[in-house]
């Protein structure tokens, strides 16, 4: 079978994307020109630092311009994603027509079989309305519009001289916006060595953010439009039985980044590829069955038997293992890591099952056997324990169910030695005995029996403590509120992910929904947190993806991350 030329459509989509980036720049230039005219005629004192709020007659007009600017940029991006969506669907229709011609089958047969002509407009609308890191498109655009306001204000302050015409001032402002380093050198030389706090904020906007708001807005536009194009591809290919997987290929650009070079390959069709990084030029094509299998899928009423791609490519696995520590500490997890999270967990992070029978040989499980089994868990999964495990013991305690502890040096505030785990042997009022139920769970897994709710919850409770052992957070004294935020997030993550611990031991969770709803530890905190998520319209899966990486970094910042998560609605206590 000949190959369909996807690249001509990809090139068309790329060129159109660049046209929208040009339009974003035009919007910026128009606003700069209008503000420069207003400022030049505004009787500004060039000897003093300029701010819009010092001149109310200017600020009102400027605020209206920036509001219009934000609307224009948002409209442009939405128009760009809609056009990219249309190109992707037209490409896939032509792809199906090509297959019909190559196999001698009619286009009419394709129309009835493979959603020929499908446009998925509801999916496009959902894509445009989605949130990223708690922000919808309008809010992300406004963030860069606010940055532009600060930059233009600083540029006028740095560049305005008595008698400057609107054209001269506009030229100076544009030059400063295009060369932010020059702007801040000018601020220093004109105002002295002390840079105003607003200028410093704009000069150091944060990791992954340009100093130029126009560059940020253009990157946002390029990324959104490219994601729209790739999402339309994903939706069409996902519905085609004869697509085995997707092949991510390098662009024709000769200067490929190292990440793109290492990650190109064939992936499962469940992977929604939208780029390895912002403004990524890599592209994907469907990885197909052979011609015979394709014809069979056309003629059969039933879905054909297809050898779908299920494994991540070896080069991806190698790259992930090499960068696992960096990824675990990253403030912003790459989109493709989140998209592949389940496959990463099952194929890379979760090692082969531990044979419980090698450690648990007694009919009535002994404490020493549980300790030996847990030490094997630490040996097999070293990434779960930041400094390894020193001790695992059973104590009569009424103050906790299970507990993780670790020593640290007061003079350096660094962890020393390994983790110590303590399991309470007390029977609590609800009938839960952590030690007995943990041993019962292990016995049930060994014997291939179903666990009771309390037994499965004991596994979740231990997993909760393992998550404490896993974090890279340094020793620190938390306020009561910081502790509540930390324990709430830790418990939320534990209840959603403890099944991977059970699977490592060869078991299967059957009470997960009930554990999530009725688990004992920090019950009221979890109940309130889940209610807040529901009220804010945030799915628990999205909250999990956002919060889990931060849980493993710094306990002291979790409150800020919660505020970021709820920034578009429900306010978290600060």
Image (cartoon, rainbow, N blue to C red):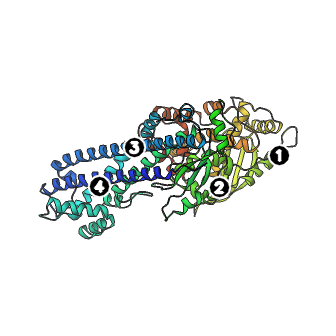
Residue 549 at least partly seen: no
Q: Residues within 10 Å of mark 2 (few under 14, many from 20)?
A: some
Q: Nearer the viewer, mark 4 or mark 3?
A: 3
Name the residue tied to disc 1.
Answer: 369
Q: Residues within 10 Å of mark 4 (few under 14, many from 20)?
A: some
**Dot placed on the residue nearer the N-terminal end, 3 or 1:** 3
Cα distance in 3D space between marks 1 and 4: 64 Å
**Dot placed on the residue nearer the N-terminal end, 2 or 4:** 4
**In the shown orientation, is residue 30 left or right of residue 281?**
left
Q: Where residue 315 sits: x, y (%)?
A: 64, 58
**Dot placed on the residue nearer the N-terminal end, 2 or 1:** 2
Vertical placement of residue 451 versus 288, above or below? above
Cα distance in 3D space between marks 3 and 2: 35 Å
Name the residue tied to disc 3.
Answer: 83
Residue at the location (42% across, 53% down)?
14
Cα distance in 3D space between marks 4 and 3: 32 Å
Helix, strand or loop at mark 2 = helix
Q: Quadrant of the C terminus?
A: top left
Name the residue tied to disc 2.
Answer: 317
- In front here: 262 or 135? 262
**In the shown orientation, is residue 396 left or right of residue 548?**
right
């Amino acid at each position: 079978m000949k190959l369909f030329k996807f690249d001509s459509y990809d090139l068309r989509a790329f060129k159109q994307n660049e046209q929208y980036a040009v339009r974003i720049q035009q919007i910026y230039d128009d606003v700069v020109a209008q503000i420069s005219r207003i400022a030049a005629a505004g009787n500004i004192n060039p000897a003093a630092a300029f701010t819009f709020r010092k001149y109310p007659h200017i600020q009102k007009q400027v605020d209206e311009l920036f509001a219009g600017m934000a609307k224009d940029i948002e409209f442009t991006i939405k128009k760009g994603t809609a056009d990219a969506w249309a190109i992707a669907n037209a490409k896939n229709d032509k792809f199906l027509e090509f297959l019909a011609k190559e196999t001698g089958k009619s286009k009419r047969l394709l129309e009835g079989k493979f959603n020929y002509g499908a446009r998925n407009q509801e999916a496009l609308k959902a894509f445009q309305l989605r949130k990223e890191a708690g922000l919808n498109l309008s809010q992300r655009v406004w963030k860069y519009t606010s940055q532009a306001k600060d930059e233009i204000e600083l540029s006028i302050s740095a560049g305005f001289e008595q008698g400057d015409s609107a054209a001269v001032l506009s030229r100076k402002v544009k030059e400063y916006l295009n060369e932010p380093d020059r702007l801040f050198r000018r601020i220093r030389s004109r105002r002295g060595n002390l840079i105003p706090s607003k200028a410093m904020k704009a000069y150091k906007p944060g990791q992954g953010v340009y100093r130029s708001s126009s560059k940020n807005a253009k990157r946002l536009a390029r990324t959104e439009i490219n994601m729209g194009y790739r999402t339309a591809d994903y939706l069409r290919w996902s519905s085609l039985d004869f697509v085995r997987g997707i092949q991510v290929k390098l662009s024709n650009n000769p200067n490929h980044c190292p990440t793109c070079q290492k990650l190109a390959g064939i992936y499962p069709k469940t992977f929604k590829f939208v780029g390895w990084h912002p403004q990524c030029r890599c592209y994907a094509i469907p990885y197909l069955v052979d011609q015979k299998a394709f014809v069979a899928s056309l003629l059969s009423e039933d879905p054909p038997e297809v050898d779908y791609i299920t494994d991540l490519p070896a080069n991806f696995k190698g790259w992930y293992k090499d960068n696992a520590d960096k990824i675990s500490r990253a403030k912003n997890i790459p989109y493709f890591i989140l998209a592949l999270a389940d496959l990463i967990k099952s194929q890379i992070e979760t090692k082969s099952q531990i044979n419980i029978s090698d450690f648990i040989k007694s009919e009535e499980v002994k404490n020493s056997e549980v300790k030996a089994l847990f030490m094997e868990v630490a040996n097999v999964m070293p990434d779960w324990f930041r400094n390894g495990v020193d001790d695992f013991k059973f104590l009569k305690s009424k103050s906790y169910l299970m507990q993780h502890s670790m020593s640290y040096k007061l003079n350096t505030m660094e962890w020393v030695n390994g983790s110590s785990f303590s399991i309470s042997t007390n029977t609590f009022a609800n009938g839960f005995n952590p030690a007995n139920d943990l041993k019962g769970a292990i016995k049930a897994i060994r014997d291939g029996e179903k666990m009771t709710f309390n037994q499965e919850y004991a596994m979740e409770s231990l997993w909760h403590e393992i998550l404490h052992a896993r974090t890279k957070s340094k020793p620190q004294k938390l306020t009561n509120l910081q502790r509540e935020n930390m324990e709430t997030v830790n418990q939320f993550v534990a209840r959603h992910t403890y099944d991977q611990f059970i699977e490592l031991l060869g078991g299967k969770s059957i009470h997960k929904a009930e554990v999530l709803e009725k688990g004992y530890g920090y019950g009221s905190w979890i109940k309130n947190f889940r209610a807040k998520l529901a009220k804010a319209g945030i799915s628990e899966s999205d909250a999990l993806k956002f919060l889990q990486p931060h849980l493993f970094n710094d306990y002291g910042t979790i409150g800020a991350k919660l505020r970021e998560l709820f920034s578009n609605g429900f306010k978290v206590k600060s």
